[in-house]
């Protein structure tokens, strides 16, 4: 299906492309190998325990759902407000959305103890479970991305078709992040997650990371292929990102202030893990690298300098990834019933863990690498097939 | 309901018990629609871990996993804490599945593998055949009593198997079943009959005149994390006087 249509002009370019595909394929093979290894030996090969029962797989799932926001929001938002600034970016944006959400759906598999049983979610869905709602909305979202891509790549797109799609795409985008947030936010057992702000926070940080990914990929595509965005498009994305970073930072501040001022013990205990406790380095890195620096770059004239803008994009994505780590780990570190000797670790030799630690193993990193390469491969193939102009067409 | 792995798959050794033992562990009178519950008297509990150990043998719980454990209200496992008025204090909270009437774990399970068993006293049970191993229930449980089969089960004695319950597959979640296999033979759970301090009372919460309900009322039984609204069927009886150490 995804035929590479751009004919490499030089031998050098061909070998560079070959190397890129080779690296991505290699990473995917490593990831798949790690997944099979884990499937055979059980999740004992991960760093997870009964105390910290969710780890890097869930974090990367949250992150991938988040970065899928950028595309459909840009494509649909631009359409709804009638803005033509991002016209040149819509195809690329939709491809990013589709690639990220497809990888998010796959990233659930390694988290399951019995992946071979996943069909039971379809045979006997339990409708009160937010996980079932998430499966449905992710399927809808993926379908919308596919339809969008189909419309955008017709030789003569029907006028207004994208506009009609936008009416479905925007609510679906809002829902996909909200429901992913509600997987966590509806649990009474986890005070740090159990806040009504979680869904809005997921949407805002999803928008930040989605736009950031769009900036980075657009830059790389601009430099390595015959496709080029409109001159003002990328700085304009940066300007848009300022608002999303500001909203994201505001929501984070509102959450911390509410907890800190009201001092509800369970909630405060978990927040302190973040502010002054063991996760403090990751949290303050999140604030500095993910909020302050990208905000300053994008709010100032620096956004017109490509290097700075791309750096802001990379940092913003890193910040949102750190944020996902913090959200998951803070609650896992502090079980509600925290009396000694704690929760049994789950394997021989780790009877109890009053002070839980979680260090991801090479298997988890391998699978994460595989996922990253899978996203990279989908984006590369999508960009080659649908974004980069065909050489014949490019000729006058 | 498909056949659950919680049901005994082998001939239960309970049948082979001498008559006197069976009588000692008998549940006794219950209402027409029993709702199994338990009261744990923290005044009587001496924190000896007997119930935790017998639970492991009864249910073949592998190394590193505990369905039932004894938490210590103190600074460390064996160190008392300095209480409100400068007195040294130490007490224990035996903790296993609370068998909530409104269980958060059941609500989030995507395949209904965790369910409230209306035919067995409204206990919260797990059908491991349906479990996909997503561990959502573990994140949702406020009490942290669920354990996961991370890998091949490991036992202190090779091939250890008391033969009461079926093994659980790798990658599935398990927890206290309230010894459902014993209840079906009119026997109380193992943690109850084995407690040397007789700190546990098992019974039917729907039987208003029964010993369980009467004791909970007399002693103003409380439930763990009551404010979370999970409505546990396990009650804790507070100490009636402060014993200074």
Image (cartoon, coloured by chain):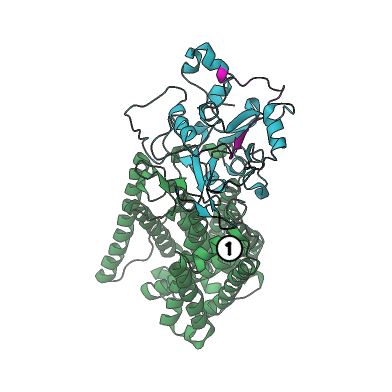
Chain colours: A green, B cyan
On-image quarter of the N terminus of chain B? top right
**Mark 1 burial class by Cα count in 10 Å: few <14, some 14-19, many 20+:** some
Image: B151 above or below A385: above
- Residue A296: x, y in percent? 51, 82
Q: Secondary structure at mark 1?
A: helix
Span of residues in magenta:
B24-46
In the image, what residue occupies the spot 30% across and 71% down? A9
Q: Is residue A321 above or below residue B198?
A: below
Q: Which residue lies most toward the right here?
A: B208
**Of A53 and B159, the residue lying toward us:** B159
Q: In the displayed structure, would residue A301 be above or below residue A162?
A: below
Mark 1 highlights which residue? A268
Q: Chain of mark 1?
A: A
Left or right: A385 in relation to B193: left
Give the percent coordinates (x, y) of residue B120.
Answer: 62, 26
Q: Nearer the viewer, residue A311 or A388?
A: A311
Q: Is residue A218 visible?
A: no
Q: Left or right: where does residue A346 sit relative to residue A237?
A: left
Q: Which residue is pictured at 42% across the width and 59% down the height?
A: A375
Secondary structure mainly formed by the magenta segment: loop
Coordinates of residue B77 in the picture (x, y in percent): 45, 48
């Amino acid at each position: 299906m995804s035929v590479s249509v751009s004919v490499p002009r030089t031998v050098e370019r061909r070998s560079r492309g070959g190397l890129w595909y080779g690296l991505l394929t290699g990473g995917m093979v490593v990831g798949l190998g790690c997944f099979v290894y884990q499937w055979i030996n059980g999740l004992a090969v991960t760093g997870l325990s009964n105390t910290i029962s969710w780890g890097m797989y869930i974090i990367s799932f949250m992150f991938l759902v988040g970065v899928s926001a950028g595309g459909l929001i840009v494509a649909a938002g631009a359409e709804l407000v009638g803005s033509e600034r991002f016209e040149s970016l819509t195809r690329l944006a939709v491809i990013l959305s589709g690639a990220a959400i497809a990888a998010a759906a796959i990233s659930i598999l390694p988290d399951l103890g019995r992946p071979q049983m996943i069909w039971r979610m379809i045979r006997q869905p339990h409708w009160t479970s937010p996980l079932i709602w998430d499966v449905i909305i992710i399927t809808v979202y993926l379908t919308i991305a596919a339809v969008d891509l189909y419309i955008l790549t017709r030789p003569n797109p029907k006028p207004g078709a994208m506009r009609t799609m936008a009416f479905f795409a925007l609510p679906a985008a809002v829902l996909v992040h909200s429901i992913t947030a509600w997987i966590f936010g509806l649990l009474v057992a986890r005070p740090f997650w159990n806040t009504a702000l979680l869904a809005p926070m997921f949407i805002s940080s999803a928008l930040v990371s989605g736009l950031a990914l769009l900036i980075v990929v657009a830059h790389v595509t601009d430099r390595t292929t015959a496709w080029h965005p409109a001159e003002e498009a990328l700085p304009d994305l940066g300007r848009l990102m300022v608002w999303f970073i500001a909203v994201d930072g505001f929501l984070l501040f509102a959450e911390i202030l509410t907890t800190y001022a009201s001092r509800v013990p369970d909630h405060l205990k978990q927040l302190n893990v973040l502010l002054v406790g063991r996760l403090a380095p990751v949290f303050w890195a999140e604030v500095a690298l993910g909020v302050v620096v990208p905000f300053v770059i994008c709010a100032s004239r620096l956004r017109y300098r490509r290097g700075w803008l791309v750096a802001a994009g990379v940092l913003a994505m890193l910040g949102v990834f750190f944020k996902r780590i913090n959200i998951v780990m803070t609650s896992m570190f502090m079980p509600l019933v925290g009396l000694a000797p704690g929760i049994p670790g789950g394997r021989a030799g780790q009877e109890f863990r009053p002070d839980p630690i979680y260090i991801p193993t090479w298997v988890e990193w391998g699978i994460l690498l595989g996922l990253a390469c899978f996203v990279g491969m989908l984006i590369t193939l999508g960009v080659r097939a649908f974004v980069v102009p065909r050489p014949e067409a490019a000729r006058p | 309901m498909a056949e659950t792995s919680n049901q005994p798959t082998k001939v239960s050794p309970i049948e082979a018990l001498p008559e006197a033992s069976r009588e000692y562990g008998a549940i006794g009178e219950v209402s027409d629609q029993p709702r199994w519950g338990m009261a744990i008297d923290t005044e009587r509990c001496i924190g000896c871990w007997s119930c935790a150990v017998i639970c492991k043998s009864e249910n073949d719980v592998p190394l590193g996993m505990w369905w039932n454990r004894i938490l210590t209200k103190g600074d460390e496992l064996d160190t008392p804490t300095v209480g409100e008025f400068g007195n040294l204090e130490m007490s224990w909270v035996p903790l296993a599945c609370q068998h909530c009437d409104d269980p958060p774990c059941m609500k989030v399970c995507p395949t209904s593998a965790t369910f409230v068993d209306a035919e067995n006293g409204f206990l919260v049970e797990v059908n491991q055949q349906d479990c996909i191993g997503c561990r959502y229930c573990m994140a949702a449980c406020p009490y942290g009593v669920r354990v996961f089969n991370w890998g091949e089960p490991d036992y202190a004695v090779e091939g250890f198997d008391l033969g009461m319950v079926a093994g659980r597959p790798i990658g599935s979640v398990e927890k206290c079943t309230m010894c459902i296999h014993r209840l079906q033979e009119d026997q109380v759970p193992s943690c109850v009959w084995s407690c040397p301090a007789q700190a546990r009372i098992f019974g039917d919460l729907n039987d208003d005149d029964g010993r369980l309900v009467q004791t909970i009322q007399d002693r103003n039984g409380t439930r763990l994390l009551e404010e979370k609204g999970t409505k546990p069927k396990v009650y804790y009886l507070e100490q009636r006087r402060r014993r200074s150490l």
